[in-house]
Image: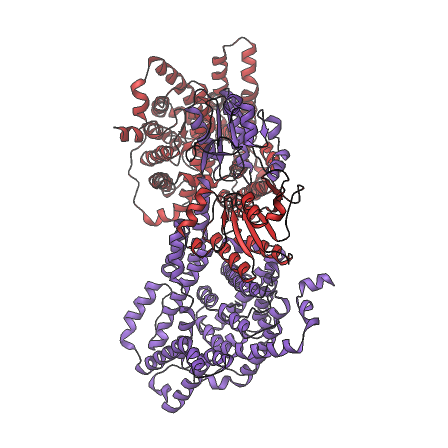
Chain colours: A red, B purple
Amino acid sequence: MRRVASLLPIFDWAPRYTRTDAVDDSVAAAIVTIMLVPQSLAYAMLAGLPPQAGLYASILPLVAYALFGSSRTLAVGPVAVVSLMTAAALAAVAPQGSPAYAAAAIALALLSGAVLLAMAALRLGFLANMLSHPVISGFISASGLLIAAGQAKHLLGIRAGGETLPQILQELWTGLGDTNAATLAVGLSTLAFLFWARRSLKPLLRRSGCAPRVADLAAKAGPLVAIGASILAVLVLDLGARGVRLVGPIPAGSPPFAIPVFDPGLWLDLLPAATLIALVGFVESVSVGQTLAARRRLRIVPNQELVGLGASNVAAALSGGFPVTGGFARSIVNFEAGAATPLAGALTAILILVATMFLTPLFRLLPQAVLAATIVVAVLALVDFAAVRRVYAYSKSDFAAMAATIVLVLMVGIEAGIVGGVALSLILFLWRTGTPHVAIVGQVPGTEHFRNVERHAVLTSPDLLSIRIDESLYFANSRVLEERVLAEVAVRPELRNVVLMCSAVNLIDASGLESLEAIAERLASAGIGFHLSEVKGPVMDALRRSDFLAHFRGRIFLSQYEAAAALAPAAHRDA
Amino acid sequence: MRRVASLLPIFDWAPRYTRTDAVDDSVAAAIVTIMLVPQSLAYAMLAGLPPQAGLYASILPLVAYALFGSSRTLAVGPVAVVSLMTAAALAAVAPQGSPAYAAAAIALALLSGAVLLAMAALRLGFLANMLSHPVISGFISASGLLIAAGQAKHLLGIRAGGETLPQILQELWTGLGDTNAATLAVGLSTLAFLFWARRSLKPLLRRSGCAPRVADLAAKAGPLVAIGASILAVLVLDLGARGVRLVGPIPAGSPPFAIPVFDPGLWLDLLPAATLIALVGFVESVSVGQTLAARRRLRIVPNQELVGLGASNVAAALSGGFPVTGGFARSIVNFEAGAATPLAGALTAILILVATMFLTPLFRLLPQAVLAATIVVAVLALVDFAAVRRVYAYSKSDFAAMAATIVLVLMVGIEAGIVGGVALSLILFLWRTGTPHVAIVGQVPGTEHFRNVERHAVLTSPDLLSIRIDESLYFANSRVLEERVLAEVAVRPELRNVVLMCSAVNLIDASGLESLEAIAERLASAGIGFHLSEVKGPVMDALRRSDFLAHFRGRIFLSQYEAAAALAPAAHRDA
């Protein structure tokens, strides 16, 4: 039973479900549905899929997450960045609009789900840690800019392509002459309304005496109001005849249940993209989930999140959807609307199912420019230039990884951005830890402490060299330590003993061990003793497993003070 | 002048060149030449090139290295692993034996040289540190096995292909029936003679009263003796008519001087392989160079090595060769033969030039099986199973990277092996530092020291939590620290203050900083104070550059003892 409960978090909260919880969950579900319907249509368009695919991706996946996810308030579904990654992955295997394209979307969701479940089985949740905060932040900001630029064609009512920022800008420039005035009017007025609703509507309603919750709900309903108003405008002004492109007929009814076609060739082609989508989606989800859980002093379980998101994506694949993950904006809305348990997600799914079955005929007359405006307003909120400035001030190497991510996303593509950013942050980390701070230390008079000779007035002895390395000894820096020690020895003719102070050494890998052996051997051949001090417990345990200690002719001192007292008693006796 | 001297190490040693140096260098050059002529022919065959290419690659590159390299005793030229990598890279762009294949070999040498020089200009020598010792060791052992297996066809006198071990073994199995008895006899007897010469000849000569130097020289000359004897056997027994494949005519004369053809398409195809060859060659060279330099208390300069090897490869490209690097065996021979300065390399080049101009007609009758036997004996000396056992005993994660490298080299290919091994060792390093050792600490009674509460009897206080993380705070572990601190806080209702002891924190990157901010914020919202202690100088300098300290409401204590005294005086007053 405990095992089942740990796999199905529902057993954790369902037995204690109260009437108050039910009210809270229902209200939250209604609010999230109002937000999710336009978003689902918009992100399906962003992914290059028919609008109903977005609705389908917002039904069964929510139920799956409610069953298997560990966050109580995370709202899954199509999100901007993952939809853009989906479009990029599918464009490589099938032409947009073809049946093969829709089938590939389903395969991509299935593969993402499989990758997430495999990561859960192998407990690989830690892989998400390879994405540093600056890389994620740069990736999301740049993706937001790229998505917004890509929507401009819908706002202008022109046909244009392009996957990178320069391509998009060039195509927009070329097509500018074909701008459709009616489309531009619809697009710009929606954009203006949505920005106003997001910024000014809520304070305005509050000032006019509106209850906070109602004001909040009204502001959240902005996109839905825009959709209603624009459909009305299309009807009254016959905008379709004036060249405003509309969403067109959407099949009504519940999502189709379909077993994805077994196609190993296609799956192999899509696997790299599916893996990246799984990883990015997981990181986005965990960041959101962790932030929200902490506010109520709850915790999420990363490996359980992998199960929840994996199940959601498999559910998306089985019901005609495309890859989904936990979205930032909608999860915050769910949280602030008072969602108490994952049941809020399941209720949202039911409400969206109702909308899918009965309201889709209305969306036929919806202008694409309105959806584009919805996307632009949503993604520009993701762009965070302040973070770039902050990272630049703190760390040039973090900034370099962030800048590379941004430039690659905009100039080459989102996959190149995330892969390049991760690779560069790894290389820079290796470079920083590969050129560690090494200090010659001496005794602070009157204490047992040893400090850097360059920063403090300390006692040293010409026949003893005490050297401290402020880093673990591992492959990236083992050669550096060898070189540094030998260089210091070369300029000290009176030297008889070297002590390596290991207080900051948290790990010695096989390369580091070989370097220690090489240093010991070279010093021995020069008639100089080589010793260690302040070796940590776990590091000492590891050394005992090797044959290092069998060959090691030096001593291992508990403290640098003991080492100095034993090896250079004259200089340190009076200290 | 100093700048020129630093770029051309010749200004360092030439002014002090003595008569003794000249004798030493000449003797070393003669010995290395005896070793290098058969090796050059053999490695050209391994790279799929005509034999003279190997000789050409052993002339001008040696002169270039003598001018620009920083090691006094490194001997550059074709080496086994790089020759195999060359064959793999060229097979992908042109059929073996075609003019395009030879042209691609020249382009590959040029590109490797360009990559090395670019790395020198960008001071990227540290990139070689990404190759950990276990990965290099596994790579070289597995390459040795793969090369030896690949030579079996020449020993059997059959035609067989295959690039991976299973392919090679399967082709050998299929072709076994076509074995040429005469070839097998020549091959096996050469193999037996070479193994005997390597193992037993020198001790035997010493016992029979031979001078050490002569005994050594005789043992080194084994391959040359085998070549002479086999040519004689071919002449006397007319082995060519019995189906023994011979090297065939080699054009005599000095190396052709040729500007490589500008072919951007080909260069782009070859660039990834050229980069890997440059990196592997550099690592091999630096390892050898460093070992030898240390024995004479000299040092090599990694960035200068990049210049030397880059110049050597460009020289190889200009004179009809293929990629070269510093070889282990020949450098040791050069060192032990007493080479005093890089002039030994230049003299070797002159001797090989003489051989190329006048001795090549002799090699026409040389059986390919003899060259194959030379290769097998040389590469099997590289296979080091003891290292695998040693690494397994010391570190399972280093062993995993090593095993992955070996399996990938044998089963998929040498490039997959090196790339996969490096990737896995990086991921495993991130995993190890991403799940760091975190200890709750308390005061050792009667001292100012704080130790792990689980290992020592220490003083703690219910309203103060002192926690020590034994790792730098960076992107791979920032989330872990957050989770751990919040989990510890969740089980301590009386808690009023948390102190993070940073004595083992060598670096805090932007992700780590965000985590600290998140922890501070969450603890503040729970009414708990958050403080730091024992923050190192460089880390504190970095924090001062950020706006962290402006928001940070806690205190930063110089020592954990001060923190405890200030925050939980009652518990620690009597200690």
Give the residue drawn at x 43%, y 69%: B95
- Quarter of the image containing the N terminus of chain A? top left
Q: Which of B9 and B468 is in front in this view?
A: B468
> Where residue B121 sits in the image (x, y, percent)?
63, 57
**Left or right: B527 as drawn, with respect to A572:** left
**Left or right: A65 as drawn, with respect to A211:** left
> Where residue A163 sits in the image (x, y, percent)?
51, 43
Examine the image and state in which quarter residue A36 appears: top left
- Quarter of the image containing the C terminus of chain A? top right
Examine the image and state in which quarter residue A179 appears: top right
Residue furthest to the top = A209
Q: Nearer the viewer, residue A296 or A307?
A: A296
Q: Nearer the viewer, residue A31 or A72?
A: A72
> Where residue B229 sits in the image (x, y, percent)?
42, 86
Examine the image and state in which quarter residue B368 appears: bottom left
Residue furthest to the right = B1
Give the residue drawn at x 32%, y 48%: A264
> Where residue B333 sits in the image (x, y, percent)?
51, 73
